[in-house]
Amino acid sequence: MEPLALKLRPNSLKDCLGQKHLIDDGKILSNLVKNCKLFSMILYGKPGIGKTTIATSLVHDLNVRYRILNATINDKHDFEIVFEEAKTYGEIVLILDEIHRLNKDKQDLLLPRIESGLVTLIGLTSSNPFHSINPAIRSRCHLFELKPLEKSDIKDGLLKASKNKELLPQITISDEAIDYIAESSGNDLRYAYNFLELAYYSKEDHKIDLDFLKTIDNKRSFFHDKNDDGYYDVLSAFQKSIRGSDVNASLHYLGRMLEANDLESIFRRMSVICYEDIGLANPSMGPKVEAAIKAAERLGMPEARIPLASVVIELALSPKSNSGVMAIDAALLDIKTGRCGEVPNHIKTTSPDYKYPHDYPHHFVNQQYLPDNLKNKKYYIPCTTSNYEKNLKQTNDNLEKLKSNS
């Protein structure tokens, strides 16, 4: 049986929800319909915001021949059937879902057909096309980003569905219940329709109110899917909140990843934060984070949240320093751009001229270590946000004085 979300899918751009920047009167996709012209394109954005709906609405409004394939499910033979049909009729529109999963064999089949105009491609993806789609495909397509739906868009869709007595006979639903579903949907219209349909068939009298919804909504939806940008948005927000010393935001994003049971991502991100953002301002955080990770692995959920929350609070409130990552990036930039030079002769493996620092006062002797063309280069620029790095700076300054005096 078709789900409600599929039954409610509109067949015209004028009936689509949201995406006003693309489908409002005078906007690009509406103008394409008015001018009876379609170009290859990629529609990208979060799940449940209307990518497939807009694609099918476009082809219906233009009354063109089309086929829908999935880059993961459909094999080369399915693609070849579409291409043969295109040859028969002169052209075809291929709506290709999950285009970011298109493998090389299928790309090699598709590219010349797009190039010749035999196939007009409408690719759909929840991933960022600049990162996930083959550049050869991407360069032949116009990219259009779909924006997250507003709560008002979700409510409009739910109101329209609740008034469809053919699909949902005898339904009655309170305004509070519609508001609750819209709020719970995480801006995902498909989720909202699925929730409405579940509620409808869970009540014998089909009367849906707020109290009933709360009994069947075990887990509110939020956007956190490893196959799309929202997953990376949460990880980014987690790190940036810690970097910005906002302890409450840090805990919020930790909570979202815990709710998704995404411990591996938490572990990896906390580990890099230790050295990228805390760094030399508080070197003790590395072992502390490692200990918290081991404790979380040993405990499992839900107890894992306790050591993780404690260490995230400490990370957020710790002094910050990015001097380590800045130093290595500066060194790598020199290397990648060819500024290397010869290793000085006296520190080569077989040199008899090397001066062993431990044979000298303070275990230090002034000798050149960098290549000649970089001998005065300074990669490490200390931060002074903590006593620890202030001490490192003082040590470094003292060594510089010893060099200048020798």
Image: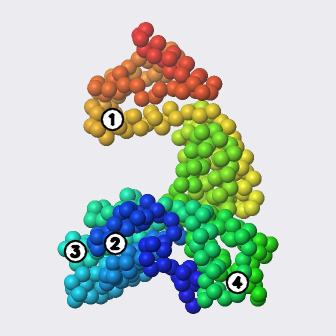
User: Label 3 sits on what residue type?
Assistant: Gly
Whether 89 is drawn above or below 355: the answer is below
Marked residue nearer the N-terminal end (1 or 4)? 4
Q: Say the numbered circle drawn on residue 265.
A: none
Residue, far right: 211
Residue under numbered circle 2: 33
Colouring:
rainbow
Marked residue nearer the N-terminal end (2 or 4)? 2
Residue under numbered circle 3: 117
Residue, far left: 116
3D distance between C-alphas at marks 3 and 4: 48 Å
User: Label 1 sits on what residue type?
Assistant: Asp
Q: Residues within 10 Å of mark 3 (few under 14, many from 20)?
A: some
Q: Secondary structure at mark 4?
A: loop
Identity of the residue drawn at 53% across and 61% down: 148
Residue under numbered circle 1: 334
Q: Secondary structure at mark 2?
A: helix
Q: Secondary structure at mark 3?
A: loop
Identity of the residue drawn at 54% across and 27% down: 383
Residue in the foreground of this view, choosing between 266 and 332: 266
Answer yes or no: do the residues labelled 2 and 1 have beta carbons within 8 Å?
no
Residue under numbered circle 4: 171
Answer yes or no: do the residues labelled 1 and 4 have beta carbons within 8 Å?
no
